[in-house]
Image (cartoon, rainbow, N blue to C red):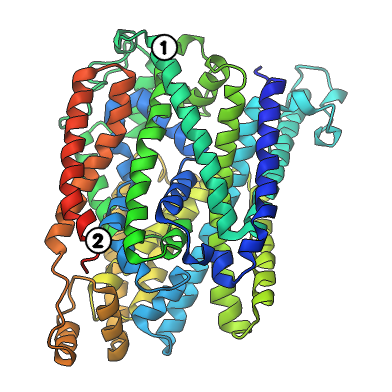
């Protein structure tokens, strides 16, 4: 059993104390106005917001997953995050962040008013479904964070270490003989109680600095946490390079041929069968053997999801909090630049140590009897990091969960205050009352989030149901809203409703064991069905109601300046203003998306080649990155003010 040292514990406690003091310190900034509280007064610089957003994405569960992917798939693992898709940030960077920010809205639901107007029944319905979507998503994320952070901390500070200090956590295992079935069952309950106890404590800390400090406090806390993660990543990667001794042979002798190449053919081409049997079984379970076809499906579904724009969560809130549309684009671009190299330097460092000392690690076994490769990360941290650095890494990852939790909470507060309280209850509420309602809404959302985490033990499945179901239903309606003039609020409502319902059916069946929806890549095969059903609902709903008010469409088209199927509205705009020009940037946007996606992959590969001391590959990656940055300086950065 691994136990944190006193020095590590002091570092973690100092971090929590600093977060509490930070929230208290930033409270005066947050009290200035509603926008100051929820959006930092739209005065925060783009690089701070981008770093804060990257901090929200540098989470424990995601990093554990990336380490396991790097272990099993090597350099080919850089393609697998297209499943999510990680390149949605490139679409935001190139054009969608600018389009969204031009609305000058406070939330994603409020943004709908700029696209569909604010009067007819369809607008009210679409507004309600987006608010419901956003709040359910926030509750799911907070419940996931609650359980995940407790389970992670229990690895380093187990129940046995604190049972004497907190006897109320015990389920009475002392009354049974050690090793008996009754003793083991009671001990498992006690450990579960301990994880929940940690979750409550850490979520309360995050709640304090989020509710009291508002967006200013969240962004500053994220900045501090990310600085910690940069130091941790550099240390972990350097330790791995030290153990390699300047040669990649120690790793390459223990992995299949092709592991150190990002290129692939029709099949994956990695054979673990003569090295680690469980790794071969895991690859078969994951379903990536026909790698070209899987990557192609991930690319198509990812493009659709990316064209829809950001979901109404912390990512959307950070974009709307920027000072200008140009800074919104810069912020989204900065996320990949600051996140990918740092995160993958840590990921590859942990992966390399896991490969070198695989036989010495005490890895957990999953319910199917196969090694749980996601446990490589905590196992390596506990075994190979020195005292002090372990505390810093654990504090950083706990801070990552707190960042995600607080960013989600801030988004939920914005929806409850702007889209429920100010819209339906007291539109003319004074500033002081608005801030009070923000505090109250935060407490309500945290209560629901923690409550779900306490009641639902299998929170990962619930999280998948919420995100897979809701995100699956999010795509089609939110693509059409940008690119087709005739699409109206009624079509949006029915498209979202149909999408959420049909997308939730397979995950719901998975809970009862009827389907294996979440196994491997099976989610990809459902995606075309979801899209067809959503498209039918969107079109039927659109033509079931009148077109959006012409004045609203004209204002949206002239303000946001989207490209797409807007010809009738463009002709009206030209009739009003003969000098008005349409957005002609489709071609250059496509080029920049291609260049940005390429650059993002290269930024992932950069630390992988560096840690393995593969200098030829590193040189090629650096040269290609120079080309990407040089081209995008001319085609993107210098043209941020264009449409």
Q: Residues within 10 Å of mark 2 (few under 14, many from 20)?
A: some
**Callout 1: SS:** helix
Q: Nearer the viewer, residue 164 or 455?
A: 164
Q: Is residue 257 above or below residue 639?
A: above
Q: Is residue 332 above or below residue 340?
A: below
Q: Nearer the viewer, mark 2 or mark 1?
A: 2
Residue 242 bears which disc, if any? 1
Q: Nearer the viewer, residue 117 or 125?
A: 117
Identify the image quadrant of the N terminus: top right
Residue 157 visible to the viewer:
no
The image quarter containing residue 527 is bottom left
Name the residue located 22 percent from the left edge and 29 percent from the top edge. 262
Q: Nearer the viewer, residue 345 or 165?
A: 345
**Callout 2: SS:** loop
Q: Is residue 606 above or below residue 501?
A: above
Give the percent coordinates (x, y) of residue 361.
Answer: 52, 14
Name the residue located 33 percent from the left edge and 55 percent from the top edge. 330
Residue 87 visible to the viewer:
yes
Give the percent coordinates (x, y) of residue 462.
Answer: 54, 50
| Distance between mark 2 and mark 1 Cα atoms | 43 Å
Identify the image quadrant of the C terminus: bottom left
Name the residue located 45 percent from the left edge and 80 percent from the top edge. 125
Give the percent coordinates (x, y) of residue 458.
Answer: 58, 43
Residue 640 bears which disc, if any? 2
The image quarter containing residue 268 is top left
């Amino acid at each position: 059993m691994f136990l944190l040292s006193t020095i590590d514990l002091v570092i973690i406690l100092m971090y929590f104390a600093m977060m509490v003091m930070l929230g208290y310190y930033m409270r005066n900034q947050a009290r200035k106005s509603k926008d100051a509280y929820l959006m930092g007064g739209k005065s925060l610089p783009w690089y701070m917001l981008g770093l804060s957003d990257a901090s929200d994405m540098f989470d424990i569960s995601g990093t554990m997953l990336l380490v396991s992917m790097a272990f099993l798939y090597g350099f080919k693992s850089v393609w697998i995050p297209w499943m999510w898709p990680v390149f949605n940030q490139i679409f935001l960077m190139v054009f969608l962040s600018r389009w969204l920010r031009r609305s000058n809205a406070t939330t994603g639901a409020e943004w709908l008013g700029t696209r569909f107007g604010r009067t007819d029944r369809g607008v009210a319905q679409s507004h309600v479904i987006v608010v419901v979507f956003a709040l359910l998503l926030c509750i799911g994320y907070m419940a996931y964070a609650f359980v995940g952070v407790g389970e992670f901390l229990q690895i380093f500070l187990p129940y046995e270490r604190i049972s004497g200090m907190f006897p109320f956590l015990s389920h009475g295992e002392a009354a049974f003989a050690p090793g008996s079935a009754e003793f083991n069952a009671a001990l498992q309950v006690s450990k579960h109680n301990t994880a929940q106890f940690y979750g409550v404590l850490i979520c309360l800390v995050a709640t304090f600095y989020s509710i009291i400090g508002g967006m200013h406090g969240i962004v500053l806390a994220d900045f501090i946490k990310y600085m910690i993660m940069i130091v941790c990543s550099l240390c972990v990667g350097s330790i791995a390079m030290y153990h390699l001794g300047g040669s990649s042979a120690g790793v390459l002798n223990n992995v299949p041929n092709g592991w150190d190449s990002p290129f692939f053919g029709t099949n994956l081409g990695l054979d673990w069968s003569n090295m680690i049997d469980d790794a071969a079984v895991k690859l078969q379970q994951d379903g990536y053997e026909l790698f070209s076809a899987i990557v192609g499906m991930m690319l198509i579904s990812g493009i659709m999801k990316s064209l829809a724009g950001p979901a109404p969560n912390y990512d959307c809130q950070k974009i709307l909090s920027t000072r200008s549309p140009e800074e919104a684009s810069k912020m989204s671009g900065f996320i990949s630049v600051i996140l990918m190299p740092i995160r993958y330097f840590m990921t590859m460092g942990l992966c390399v140590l896991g490969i070198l000392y695989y036989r010495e690690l005490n890895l957990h076994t999953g319910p199917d009897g196969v090694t749980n490769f996601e446990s490589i990360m905590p196992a390596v941290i506990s075994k190979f990091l020195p005292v002090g650095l372990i505390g810093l890494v654990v504090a950083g990852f706990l801070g990552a969960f707190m960042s995600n939790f607080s960013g989600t909470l801030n988004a939920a507060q914005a929806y409850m205050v702007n889209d429920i309280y100010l819209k339906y209850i007291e539109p003319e509420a004074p500033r002081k009352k608005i801030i009070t309602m923000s505090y109250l809404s935060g407490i309500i959302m945290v209560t629901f989030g923690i409550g779900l985490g306490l009641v639902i033990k299998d929170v990962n499945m619930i999280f998948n149901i919420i995100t897979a179901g809701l995100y699956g239903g999010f795509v089609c309606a939110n693509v059409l809203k940008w690119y087709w003039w005739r699409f109206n609020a009624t079509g949006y409502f029915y498209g979202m409703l149909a999408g959420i319902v049909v997308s939730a059916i397979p995950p719901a069946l998975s809970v009862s064991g009827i389907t294996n929806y979440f196994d491997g890549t099976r989610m990809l095969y459902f995606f075309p069905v979801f899209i067809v059903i959503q498209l039918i609902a969107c079109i039927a709903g659109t033509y079931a109601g009148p077109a959006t008010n012409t004045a609203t469409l004209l204002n949206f088209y002239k303000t946001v300046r989207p490209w797409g199927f807007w010809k009738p509205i463009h002709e009206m705009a030209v009739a009003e203003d003969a000098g008005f020009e349409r957005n002609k940037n489709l071609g250059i946007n496509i080029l920049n998306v291609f260049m940005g996606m390429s650059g993002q992959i290269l930024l992932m590969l950069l630390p992988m080649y560096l840690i393995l001391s593969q200098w030829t590959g590193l040189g090629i990656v650096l040269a290609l990155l120079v080309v990407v940055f040089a081209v995008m300086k001319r085609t993107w950065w210098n043209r941020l003010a264009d449409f």
